[in-house]
Amino acid sequence: MSYAHGNVGIDDECAPSVTGSSDVEREFIEQWLAAGYAVAATDYAGIGTDGVNAYTDGPAAGANAVDIVRAAHKLYGDQLSDRWIVTGLSQGGHASYFAAHQATTRTAELDFRGAIAVAAPTHLDQLFPLAGPNFPSVPVAGIAHYVLYTLAGLDDGRPELDIRQHLTPTGIDLMEKAKATCSNDLNEYLRSHPVTVAELFTTPLDTPDLREALDQMQHVPTSGFDRPIRVVHSLTDTKLPIPLTWAQLAEMRSNGVYVEYQQLSGTDHAHTLTASMAESLDFAARVLH
């Protein structure tokens, strides 16, 4: 199993290979190990390697989640089965969609069987261009946090977009802080120094060049999958609104994609991962049989 981690931040010191996994993710991985699975877990490009992580760049993170399996096979060879799946939480759920979309062609030498996307953001490419000085206050925890990480990745990886021209001095300062601050610490800073999305911008992000870049990075595929996909989300997830997943499911199913869906309630964003464990193990057993 390839595991794609949730948001940890984008600085090198935030890499799960450096810090270890979060408590919830560690519990999740340990249950897979106890069930007899090998788990390969990647850091994303730019976290522990050159450059700034392109946060929510799905094709890049998806490729990372695929390539870690190829790397594991180079290291361990015949000790591993050719059959594999991918799963991830939040940012990693987003990566899992993209990994699933490219896995059979990117790893033709292996036998990809399916994906589990847990509490995964979708439709960001439609929402992010709405950011600007008139963006309303919305009751979604940490939205400025996600915006800042995305801006930081765009600033470093796509300089031709000149993302800074859209930002206030506050926006630029916080974007630079995001580049060097891990997720939990950035959350703490924003709690004690609250900022609205509108305060980050001088002009809207809704330009043709930015829309094209965000479409390439963030648009989760809704067709072209050749293996089963399992999607999990909680009604009580306050970090990622569940209607985005409902829209994703409707589009995938209308395009003939085979997708299983588990909807939870009374479970927060991160614990959706462990609350759905039994059903995820059952899915894996079926597709890997």
Image (cartoon, grey):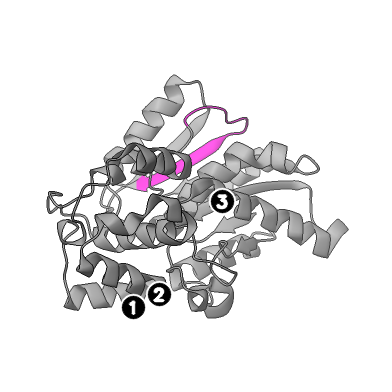
Evaluate if marks 1 and 2 touch, with contact meaning CB atoms under 8 Å apart. Answer: yes
Q: Nearer the viewer, residue 72 or 171?
A: 171
Mark 1, secondary structure of its residue = helix
Figure quadrant of the C terminus: top right
Mark 2, secondary structure of its residue = loop
Give the extent of the magenta segment: 222-233
Q: Nearer the viewer, residue 179 or 61?
A: 179
Q: Does residue 168 appear to the left or right of 47 in the view shown?
A: left
- Quarter occupied by residue 38: bottom right
Q: Is residue 247 visible?
A: yes
Q: Neighbour class for label 2 at 10 Å: few (<14), some, many (≥20)?
A: some
Residue 243, image x and y in percent?
Answer: 27, 39
- Quarter occupied by residue 176: bottom left
Quote the CA–CA distance across marks 1 and 2. 6 Å
Residue 194, image x and y in percent?
Answer: 16, 70
Q: Amino acid at mark 1?
A: Asp
Residue indicated by mark 2: 182
Q: Does residue 197 appear to the left or right of 258 in the view shown?
A: left
| Numbered marks: total | 3
- Is 229 magenta? The answer is yes
Q: Is residue 277 visible?
A: no
Mark 3, secondary structure of its residue = helix
Residue indicated by mark 3: 60
Quote the CA–CA distance across marks 3 and 1. 25 Å
Foreground label between 3 and 1: 3
Residue indicated by mark 1: 185
Quote the CA–CA distance across marks 3 and 2. 20 Å
Figure quadrant of the N terminus: bottom right
Q: Amino acid at mark 3?
A: Ala
Residue 52, image x and y in percent?
Answer: 49, 65
* Residue occupying image coordinates x 21% and y 55%: 140
